[in-house]
Image (cartoon, helix red, strand yellow):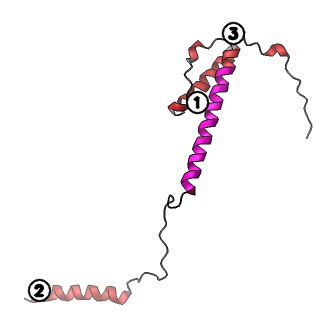
């Protein structure tokens, strides 16, 4: 596979005091939607409509990304604790060694004959 050389962006590409572009504002909106899905304790208390500059966008995205990563790490630790504890997993019933008896055709017919006989007795009375 051919290697494609991508030049580094110039230092002027990021200006923390420059007004945020429409693309950056859209990214802030998407990050805010992701942040709202987090539990309350992981959310930032940043009012996203007040974000105006590239530096503020970078700080907000960094905080939300860190919060999402922390929420996933905490959830993984919680799952690991639940599975590591004895008795925390569901117990599955053991399979029995013997097979359940199935009704044989003769016993099924016998039951029907007994029912027929009892009907016949009631008719004769």
Q: Is residue 74 magenta?
A: yes
Start and end of the magenta stretch? 58-83
> Dot 1, how many residues are within 10 Å of its Cα: few (below 14), some (14-19), or many (20+)?
some
Is 21 placed above or below 75 here? above
Which is more foreground, mark 2 or mark 1? 1
> Dot 2, how many residues are within 10 Å of its Cα: few (below 14), some (14-19), or many (20+)?
few
Numbered badge on residue 19 = 3
Q: Is residue 6 magenta?
A: no
The residue at 62%/36% (across/down) is: 70
The residue at 65%/31% (across/down) is: 66
> Dot 3, how many residues are within 10 Å of its Cα: few (below 14), some (14-19), or many (20+)?
some
**What element does badge 3 sit on?**
loop
Q: Residue furthest left?
A: 125
Q: Position of residue 4 (x, y in %)?
A: 90, 32
Determine which residue is flagged by label 2. 123
Measured in 3D between alpha carbons, the distance from the residue under mark 2 to the one under mark 1, in whole angstroms, is 78 Å
Measured in 3D between alpha carbons, the distance from the residue under mark 2 to the one under mark 3, in whole angstroms, is 99 Å
Quadrant of the image containing the C terminus: bottom left
Q: Quadrant of residue 31?
A: top right
Determine which residue is flagged by label 1. 34
Q: Position of residue 123 (x, y in %)?
A: 11, 86
Q: Are marks 1 and 3 in contact (CB under 8 Å)?
A: no
């Amino acid at each position: 596979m051919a290697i494609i050389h991508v030049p580094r962006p110039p230092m002027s590409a990021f200006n923390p005091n420059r007004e945020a572009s429409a693309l950056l504002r859209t990214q802030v909106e998407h990050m805010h939607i992701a942040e709202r899905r987090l539990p309350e304790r992981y959310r930032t208390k940043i009012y996203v409509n007040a974000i105006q500059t590239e530096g503020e966008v970078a700080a907000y995205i960094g905080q939300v990304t860190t919060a999402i990563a922390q929420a996933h790490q905490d959830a993984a630790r919680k799952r690991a604790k639940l599975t590591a504890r004895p008795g925390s997993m569901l117990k599955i019933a053991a399979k029995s060694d013997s097979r359940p008896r199935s009704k044989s055709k003769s016993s099924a017919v016998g039951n029907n004959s007994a029912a027929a006989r009892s009907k016949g007795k009631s008719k004769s009375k």
